[in-house]
Image: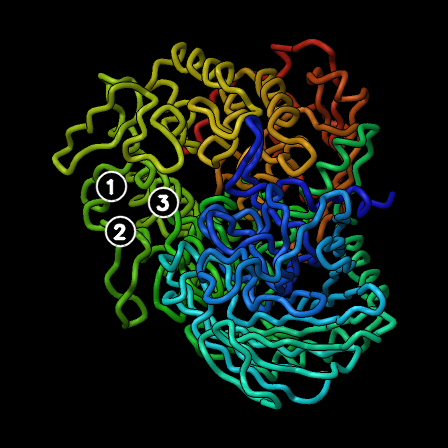
Amino acid sequence: MDKVKYVDTIIGTVADEQGDDCHGGGKTYPGAAVPGGMVQLSPDTVTGGDNGNGYNYCHNTIEGFSFNHMSGIGWYGDLGNLQIMPVIGETDLRSGSNCHIEFKNGKQGWKSEFRHETEVTQAGYYAVELDRYNIFAEATANVHTGMLRFTYPENENARIIMNFSRRIGGKADFEEINILNETTVEGKIICTPKGGGFGHGDGKITYDFYFICELSHKPSKMQFFSDEEYQAENLTEFSAEDVGLILDFGNELGEPVVLRCGISYTSLEGARLNLKSEMTDFDFDTQRKRASNLWSEVFDAIDVEGSNETDLKLFYTCLYHVLLDPRVSADVDGSFTLNGKAIRDDGYTHRTVFSGWDVYRSEFPLLAIIRPDIVNDEVNSLLKIAEVNNSSFPRWELLGINAGCMVGDPGLIVVADAYLKNIRNFDTQKAYRIGVASGRGEKELFNKEFHTIRPLAEEYLSKGYVPEKLSDTLEYLLADYTMYLFCKEKGDSENAEFFFNRVKSYKDNYNEKLGFLAPRYKSGEFVFEENEYDDDGCVESNIFQQSWFVPYDVPGLFNLFGNERAHVLLERFFEKADLSKLWNDDYNHSNEPCHNLTHYFDITGLAHRTQYWTRKVQKEAYRTGAFGFCGNEDVGQLSAWYVLSALGFAQVCPGHQDYFINTPLFKKATVKLNKEYHTCTNADTLTVICDEDPLEYPYISKLEFNGEEIKRPYLSYFEITSGGTLKFCLSKNPVEDYFEKFELSFLDC
């Protein structure tokens, strides 16, 4: 089966102007990329607003094509460097849709209208007709390189505008550009928080972007411009805060212009080496085929068989988004940059764009099964950053910098979970010591000052909660639970006991008067909450949504609420939600605190309700088209939830290695395992099969693993990765008493 054909990169591309009552705000981009590519080359409809992906389906103009984008992020994005725009004749020297830079002389800008009917959005390829100029623009990519092809109308003045100062979420601070020869331009673009960027500068992201661009045709003229004014002719070098370059090809081209470019975050030499290693010619069609082949290779990790074309499109498009990040940030020779210093490490591939608070929930549990090598790379990358800074692992990392976005200690969760899954090709002892230092709020590590990621660490250490911050408290407690398991596995009983005693303290945050978990003042008194829908102290959630977030002790949480009341509340939580909406005060799939709650029913003896609600979320919170995601795609997390649940399970609690069962989406799925990281005791694949079509028979009547009947609604990670066959016997009606009733508290493990 040609899986690549099912990818539609237009899914989820609506940004801050939703324009639809049901879905939107996925903030993905439709451009060209390969798995984990440093280059993610996409059209830009705007620079400004909450359009961190650079492209908003609701817009009708394109201002150019830039070489690096972030997918699905929800916080005023970054990157979008080296913007290239083909035009005809003279134009204004601004794009006309950059909200960060006002016109000085121009009025319309160089942007062009376009129609979605002319867009082609595929894995590794993007194309569109620029209506203003009648130019057909195409893009494709490799890991460190990108290629553009522009087909101009005959007998028109063909030109290319190179915009070096452009940056999503702001602008570059300074650019140093050099025309090497008649067909080659290279340079350095300096970006700091002064110019904005991630979180409009609040992410404190600093990076240097190096590039080399080569042209298939020699322009008749190249001329720099800055601040909407042309610079002196015949300049071959130019440096300023606002640099652009016009390439003029005259009106006798006769064939398309192809531009190939290598990029690096480390050096010009790195950019040159990347280009030389990956793109040695201007054969666009061959490069496009290579990109498609790279996607075919990674999609070989999972084969699914089903008759529903929409499900297949959603599955492989979601898998596509899962595999975009964390992306490669090292050059082909292994060089990368941290804190402005070049580092080389051949032991792993350094990666970036770690949206930790999101992706620890489903993306990394999925990658551990289908791409444990990526998990290992990312753990090494987090460890290297922590080592260089003598700090906790980053929470939300971009280009080596902890942007500080969101809450908790998710880097620790991912590292500990990897170790517990026997993904250990990293300095496990150093990682362990960093985890302990972060969890215990140590002031010093490795004979140097230690920089914790946990604000108010002293109060959390002494009180077991972060004053007035319920989300922070519960996230830290979960990280400490994974640290408790890490300590046990390491044989460190003293630290294991310390973390175990702390995580039990979640019960102290139960407000009996309110009947839910709630934030507390420094004094210990509860912050007043009118009802469970108040959001004081909650991050992208409310009291009702956040109160379920004790995945390591679901039975204990239910007992705290009153078991019968908790079951009634959980059912109400799902029943009142409109799963197709962008936001719900009850179950809210568009934000991560609610993810994996459908599987709580497995834990509390009502597995058929897990089967029911998981299918409802699959079918109502995901759909095709630009409005296809119910909220920010969140760098692979929303997609990973779909892929894992489609296979038939989810890891409810990081660290604890049980994956809880739901009815698969397809009649058959085959997952390739990795013998370097997985035992493959039974087989080098896991085959998930259903005896009936799960779309018509949504309930489980019997479960077998390698011929042995299983009466528990979970498999361990180690069972899954031992390989073999997981067989579902299905029913049209709920089978309420198939799985043995039990209450599994992971604190007992």
Q: Is residue 376 visible?
A: no
Nearest to N terminus: mark 2 or mark 3: 2
Q: Is residue 549 visible?
A: yes
According to the picture, the residue beneath numbered tag 1 turns out to be 466
Give SS at disc 3.
helix
Q: Position of residue 586 (x, y in %)?
A: 44, 22
Amino acid carrying label 2: it is: Pro
Q: Nearer the viewer, residue 168 or 318?
A: 168
Q: CA distance from mark 1 to mark 2?
A: 9 Å
Q: Are marks 1 and 2 in contact (CB under 8 Å)?
A: yes
Q: In the structure shown, which secondary structural element does the residue marked by tag 1 occupy? A: loop
Residue occupying the point 62% across, 82% down: 223
The crowd level at tag 1 (other Cα within 10 Å; few <14, some 14-19, many 20+) is: many
Choose the circle earlier in sequence order: 1 or 2.
Answer: 2
Q: Cβ–Cβ below 8 Å for labels 2 and 3? A: no
- How much space separates mark 2 and mark 3, taking CA atoms? 15 Å
**293 and 462: which is toward the camera:** 293
Q: Position of residue 540 (x, y in %)?
A: 40, 36
Q: Specify the label residue 523 is tagged with.
A: none
Q: Which residue is mark 2?
A: 455
Q: Which of the 4 quarters of the picture holds residue 38?
A: bottom right
Q: Position of residue 37 (x, y in %)?
A: 65, 62
Task: Give the residue displayed 38% in from the left and 11% down from the top.
Answer: 565
Q: Of the residues shown, which amino acid type is indicated by label 1?
A: Val
Q: CA distance from mark 3 to mark 1?
A: 14 Å
Q: Which residue is mark 3?
A: 480
Q: What is the three-letter code of the residue carrying label 3?
A: Asp
Image: 353 above or below 349 = above
Q: Earlier in the sequence, mark 3 or mark 1?
A: 1
745 over 67 or under it: above or below: above
Look at the image and tell me in which quarter the N terminus lies: top right
